[in-house]
Amino acid sequence: MKTNEEIMEILAAYDLTGSYRKAAELAGCDHHTVRRYVQLRGTGIDPAARIPRTKMIDAFMPKVEELIEASRGRIGADQVHKKLIAMGYGGTDRTTRRAVAAAKESYRTGHRRVHRPWVTEPGLWMQWDWGEGPRLGDRRTSLWCAWLAWSRFRVVIPVLDKTIPTVAACLDATFRVFGGVPTYCLTDNEKTVTSTHIANVAVRNPDIVPIARFYGTVIRTCMPADPASKGGVENTVKVAKRDLVPTATNLRSSYGSFAEIEAACDAFMAEVNGRVHRETRRAPVEMLGEERFRLHQVPEHPYTAAFGTSRQVHDKDSTIRVDQVRYSVPHQLAGGQVFVRWHADELVVTAVVDGTPAEVVRHPRSTPGNPVILDEHYPDSARGARVPRPTNAAEEAFLTIGPGAASWLEEAAAEGVRGIAAKMAEAVALAKLRGQGAVDRALGTAALAGRFSEGDLRSILDHQAFHDAPAAPSRAGEQHSLQPGTSAWSGFGDPR
């Protein structure tokens, strides 16, 4: 096979001499070679093109193309080679791989999917999808990822399940972050949205329909197993998982609580929505301010029917009763209303906080007579502890001095000191003369040292007045005692 340079020299020699033999003498080749290249050029064929040769696999190519067509281009070359051997093919697997690769490229050329660019319109489309969230110990979490198509504004909310009430709560929270409701909401075909397909038509879950109707939006689903039809939110899920889920790539440490995951999601949203988007060259939070004028108004109250049944929180002990069992809720909800539902063996308690539904606690299922009470729901009600609260003007004047006064009162009461009221009145009088700060510090020192006698407070005040910093309290020990000794009686009875 001649190189391109040699072929050009042969053709140039023929153009110069006009004879096959003379051109062959000049080019140093056979005149038949000159004749062949000249004839190829005359018919419009590239003289440098390699003439295909027949191969052993050519007789089996129809079968190869049939297998690729039947598998939609997914079958591997090793499986094709096994089938060809069973049909009598005697070539190597290398030849089969080359043939399969060429056939797949031909198949993709005729079946390549081309997407029409999506020109978004303000206030029209929102997309949402789920991503695998970080783990809390052995418990799995999920990330609700929503994406407003025109402004590219993203919302990421961590959740513990993907049930209908959770979807309703996430939709409500997302709409309130957007500041409005879009016309359409596009998502995947999960059971919470699509119950089944009939004749390629998605049948909506009857529980999601009233939620969409309540917010004035229409829920649409993409084709099954077709992530390309909602690429915007798919990219949001990918970026959220990359930045929020602890991996060896981002070196993020594990989370200690669900509140840490929520804080990380808030920081992530502030970051991605505040930076310039590469497509629009504007920050999503800036474009959201314009898109809000095209969104529908969010209902004043959230859709609560999906959160379960309502329960009134007891205003004294901050508990609710479900199936004759008492369960505690955070003390801030005492006297309010919450919604409860069962998710497997967990009681999910949801409350509407500042107009937005939020899950407040989950309790394991219990039985009558075994209440489920969490200590963190009662932070200021330790058993046996009393906080000083004034009941008259004199007590209020003393406790106003500062925390040292409260410590002195608690320690003095514990020691059973007599005349506490008189000593408190003395401290109030000294505070007017010497200043509240000095008296409060002296009272704190007296409480630590256990000095509650008459004149102790004045003594401590005088001592601290001559020092820049308060002196450490000193206590009498066995080596240094104020008790009078008996050395004067050592000579008693001695005649000398």
Image (tube, grey):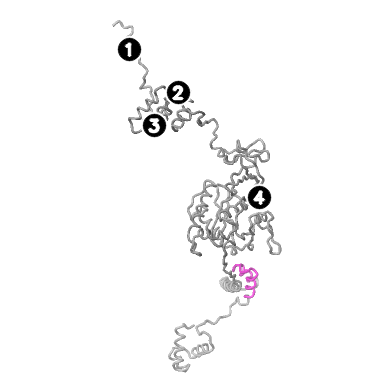
Distance from Cα at disc 1 to Cα at disc 2: 40 Å
The disc, 1 or 3, on the residue closer to the chain's N-terminal end is 3
339 relative to 459, above or below: below
Counting from the top left corner in percent of width and height, residue 289 is at: 52, 58
For residue 164: magenta? no
The disc, 2 or 4, on the residue closer to the chain's N-terminal end is 4
Foreground mark, 1 or 3? Answer: 3
Q: Secondary structure at mark 2?
A: helix
Residue for badge 3 = 435
Foreground mark, 2 or 4? Answer: 2
Q: Amino acid at mark 4?
A: Ala
Distance from Cα at disc 1 to Cα at disc 3: 47 Å
Q: Amino acid at mark 3?
A: Gly
Counting from the top left corner in percent of width and height, residue 115 is at: 58, 69
Distance from Cα at disc 3 to Cα at disc 2: 19 Å
Residue for badge 1 = 488
How busy is the neighbourhood of tag 1: few (under 14 within 10 Å), some, or many (20 plus)? few
CB-based contact (under 8 Å), mark 3 and mark 2? no
Question: Which range is magenta?
Answer: 61-84
Q: Secondary structure at mark 3?
A: loop
The disc, 3 or 2, on the residue closer to the chain's N-terminal end is 2
Distance from Cα at disc 2 to Cα at disc 4: 62 Å
Q: Amino acid at mark 2?
A: Ala
Q: Residue at x 66, y 55 (%)?
A: 208
CB-based contact (under 8 Å), mark 4 and mark 1? no
Distance from Cα at disc 4 to Cα at disc 1: 91 Å
Q: Nearer the viewer, residue 164 or 481?
A: 164
Residue for badge 4 = 306
